[in-house]
Amino acid sequence: MQKAPEFFSDYQERVIPALQKSRGYKNKHQVPKLIKVVINTSVASSPDVKQALEIAKEELALITGQKPIETIAKKSISNFKLRAGQAIGAKVTLRGRIMYEFLERFLKMALPRIRDFRGVSTKSFDGQGNYTIGIADQSIFPEIELDKIKRNIGFDVTIVTSAKNSEETREFLTELGMPFAGRNNPKKSIAVEKISISHTDAAITTPSQS
């Protein structure tokens, strides 16, 4: 039988009791949990959409360990030379073991590689338990070999939880180790200091609206 991912074990053994104590949950089933993580990229603005899409799919597969699916334009936009039904991006939806393994690598290895990293934004909650981080390019992911990058691909990483509002989502993700910007987040320094590697020029961006 496969051993549970360390990130999941930490959630069960430390995060659940900590949140029960801090938020007064009567039982562990009330504690927020991770539902899925969606990694999405759009190449609609690329001059060569077809080639850019293939590269994006290859990079997503490397980063997540799961085959991505193509995302399709819902309507035509002449100014952007888009046609309804045209493949314009790719995404991967992670659940279960692979979701926990990805998040652990993302928090402990990828985010600390951002140059001058000072934490992620506290303004990217949707009020319904979800949080999105925009990543400028794929070079922060340890699975990517820098000398083999053919073009920069940006991503949105959306963490979907069972939390009921932004406050609950933030406390839950903070306890998991999400390094939010700000002085009052002890988890930030823990996540950043866990690994010491050279920074890249990648930066956090505002999540795309595509």
Image (spheres, grey):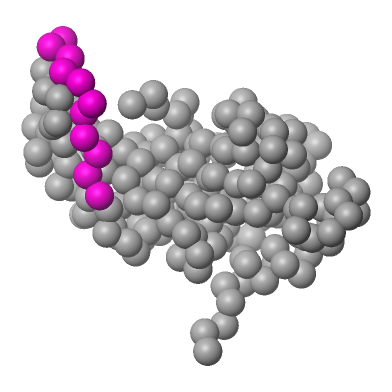
Q: How many marks?
A: 0
Q: Nearer the viewer, residue 24 or 140?
A: 24
> Residue 2 versus residue 139: which sits nearer the camera?
2
Residue 105 appearing in the image:
no
Is residue 95 in view from this perspective? yes
Q: Relative to 130, is 84 above or below? A: above
Taking the spot 55% from the left edge, 53% from the top edge, the residue there is 35
Residue 50: x percent and y percent?
9, 38
Question: Which residue is found at the position 57% from the left and 38% from the top?
Answer: 130
- Residue furthest to the bottom in view is 1
Task: Compare residues 14 and 112 and report the one nearer the observer.
Answer: 14
Q: Is residue 141 left or right of residue 126?
A: left
Asked if residue 25 lies left or right of residue 8, the reply is right
The front one of 22 and 28 is: 28
Please report the bounds of the magenta region as a residue range: 69-79
Q: Is residue 29 left or right of residue 130?
A: right
Instruction: Say if 84 sits above or below 27 in the image.
Output: above
The quadrant in which residue 123 appears is top right
Instruction: Pinpoint residue 71: horizontal percent, then vertical percent.
Output: 25, 39
Q: Residue furthest top?
A: 79
Residue 167 position in % (x across, y down)? 74, 34
Q: Residue at x 27, y 53 (%)?
A: 68
Magenta span has 43? no
Q: Residue at x 32, y 45 (%)?
A: 91
Residue 145: image quadrant is bottom left
Q: Is residue 76 magenta?
A: yes
Residue 210 point in image, percent of width and height = 33, 26
Going by the image, does 33 lie left or right of 149? right
